[in-house]
Image (cartoon, helix red, strand yellow):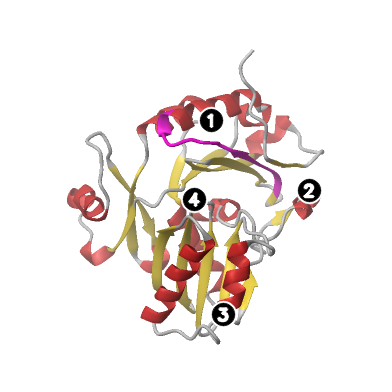
Amino acid sequence: MGVKIKATTSHIDPNLDLNKAKSCHLSIQVNLDGFTFAVLNLLEQKYIALEHYDIINNNSYNNLAEQIDLIINNQELLQQNFASTSVGIAHTFNTITPKALYDEENGKDILAFNHVLLQNETETRDWIQAIQAFNSYFIPEELERCFNKHFKNILWKHNSSILIESLIHQFKLQEGERIYISIQNKSFDVTVLESKHLKFFNSFSYRVAEDLIYYLLFTIEQLQLNPNQTPLIISGEIEQDSEVYKLLYKYIRNISFTKRNPNYKYSFVFDQTKEHFHYKLLNQHLCVS
């Protein structure tokens, strides 16, 4: 019997029928320290399952792939034939380039300009229609082999592409400049929108709450925004009693959490998790459909 990895978070509708997986979409989000998936009933446009697994003390994609193998082999829901499957890769090795400046033949060079690539790593890209730009990144070979073993016709997206497209789609009618911050365990993304126009995007790594607030305030200063007036909207797995939130609240006056995408329905089991959690995962289908 193989080792069983227990889900850190599990919200599965008790009425979920495995025989109806062919009418569902599977969204997966993966990074070095976590694996999360959600199941969307396509007929009802309703999310009916979500599970998250912490991958502890991991620093290699080879080990991550082994852990994901164990998770899939132990979770019957992930062994079904879904109508479609998408994977959002969450790392900061990506470069966004306007269409006018992008050349597919030099895609790897564009990515290597900002990031050190290994010899066997190849560039792939997302087309972000909303900003008329390409997002270059790489898919680790170990993960590609792992997922291709379990799923067919996978649609890959970089998490930053999902975030940008989702925010513009959901908040394009909002007036004025607004700062959106998506917080992960060891990194965070800052997106600045003015209506449907992207003014700024960048990802930052951080270790402690003070790192995060330093990078954010520096960005606000460089963009000549007013921290007392410009709205800051938070998404990600962050609690209101965390050190990060307390520091944000100290320096930013107009602060709130994002809401779920109203274009989808959500099973009652999602009442157990906060609305601003798993924002990118629950908008992944929007960006691949």
Q: Residues within 10 Å of mark 2 (few under 14, many from 20)?
A: some
Judged from the image, the secondary structure of the residue bearing numbered disc 2 is helix
Say few, some or many: other residues with alpha carbon within 10 Å of mark 1 (under 14 / 14 to 19 / 20 or more). Answer: many
Segment colored magenta: 47-62
Q: Secondary structure at mark 3?
A: loop
- Whole-Å distance between the Cαs marked 4 and 1? 22 Å
- What amino acid is labelled 2 in the image? Val
Residue to which mark 4 is pinned: 288
Q: Position of residue 251 (x, y in %)?
A: 55, 78
Which residue, given by chain and number where applicable, does mark 1 sit on? 68
The amino acid marked with disc number 3 is Pro
Q: Which residue is mark 3?
A: 231
Say which label, 4 or 1, has the lower sequence index.
Answer: 1
At horizontal 49% and vertical 50% (from top left) the residue drawn is: 288
Which residue is at the front of the view, 245 or 131? 245
On screen, residue 205 versus residue 233, left or right, reads: left
Q: Earlier in the sequence, mark 4 or mark 2?
A: 2
Q: Which of these two is toward me, 182 or 196?
A: 182
Query: Which residue type does callout 1 highlight?
Result: Ile
